[in-house]
Amino acid sequence: MNDAFKTQCDRSVYIHGVHFDHFARGIYAGEPDIIRDFVMDSLPDRVRGIFPAKSGVFIAPCPDGDDNPTWIVVCELQCVDPLSPNAHYSALTCCWFANDIAVPIAQFVAPLIAQLDWAALAMDAHY
C-alpha cells in the first residue's frame, strides 16, 4: 500500500504494517463483560508486542453490548512529517475493533484514520 491516508489535521500517513488478531485469543468461555475488561486491560501490552517500534499508541473504545468484537485490527502508521523539527518522522500504532474483516483494508481504515488527531496521539521518531 503506497497510498497515503489523510488524518483529521490533514496529515498524510502511510500504513507500514497491519495485524489481525482474535479479540479474545486464548479465552474459550466466560462472561462477555469480564472478557472485555480483561482484554482491554491487557491490550496496550499486546499492541506493543505486535509492533514494538517507538510510536504513540491509540486504542479505540471497545463497543459495549452483549457480544464482544470478533477481531482487533492493529495498524502501524507513519507520517514523513515529524511533530518537531529535530525528528525524522512521526508514528502511531492504532488498535481498532471489527466483526467483519472481509473488506479491503483501505476501505476499513480510511474513515478511522480521518478521525485521528495526529498531533495529540503520535510520537516523533528517528531512523
Image: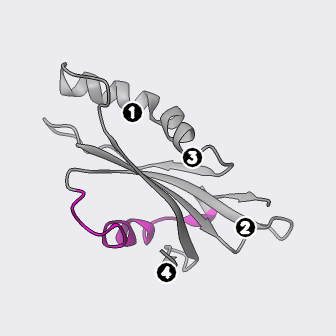
Compared across the picture, whether 24 is left or right of 117 comes to: left
Residue 4 included in the magenta stretch of the image: no
- The residue that disc 1 covers is 40
CB atoms of marks 1 and 2 within 8 Å = no
Residue 28 locus on image (x, y percent): 21, 22
Q: Earlier in the sequence, mark 1 or mark 3?
A: 1
**Residue kind at label 4, given as amino acid type:** Asp
Local crowd size for mark 3, using a 10 Å CA cut-off: few (<14), some (14–19), many (≥20):
some
Q: Quadrant of residue 66?
A: top left
Residue 86 locus on image (x, y percent): 86, 66
**Residue kind at label 1, given as amino acid type:** Met
Local crowd size for mark 2, using a 10 Å CA cut-off: few (<14), some (14–19), many (≥20):
some
Q: Please tell me the numbered disc located at residue 51.
A: 3
**CA distance for labels 1 and 2:** 29 Å
Name the foreground residue: 37 vs 13.
13
Q: Earlier in the sequence, mark 2 or mark 4?
A: 4
Name the foreground residue: 64 vs 113.
113
Q: Residue at x 35, y 66 (%)?
A: 105
**CA distance for labels 4 and 1:** 31 Å
Name the foreground residue: 58 vs 21.
21
Q: Could you tell me which quadrant the C terminus lies in?
A: bottom right
Q: Quadrant of residue 21?
A: top left
Q: Is residue 62 above or below residue 45?
A: below
- The residue that disc 4 covers is 3
Q: Earlier in the sequence, mark 1 or mark 2?
A: 1
Q: Nearer the viewer, mark 1 or mark 2?
A: 2
* Disc 1 element: helix
**Residue kind at label 2, given as amino acid type:** Tyr
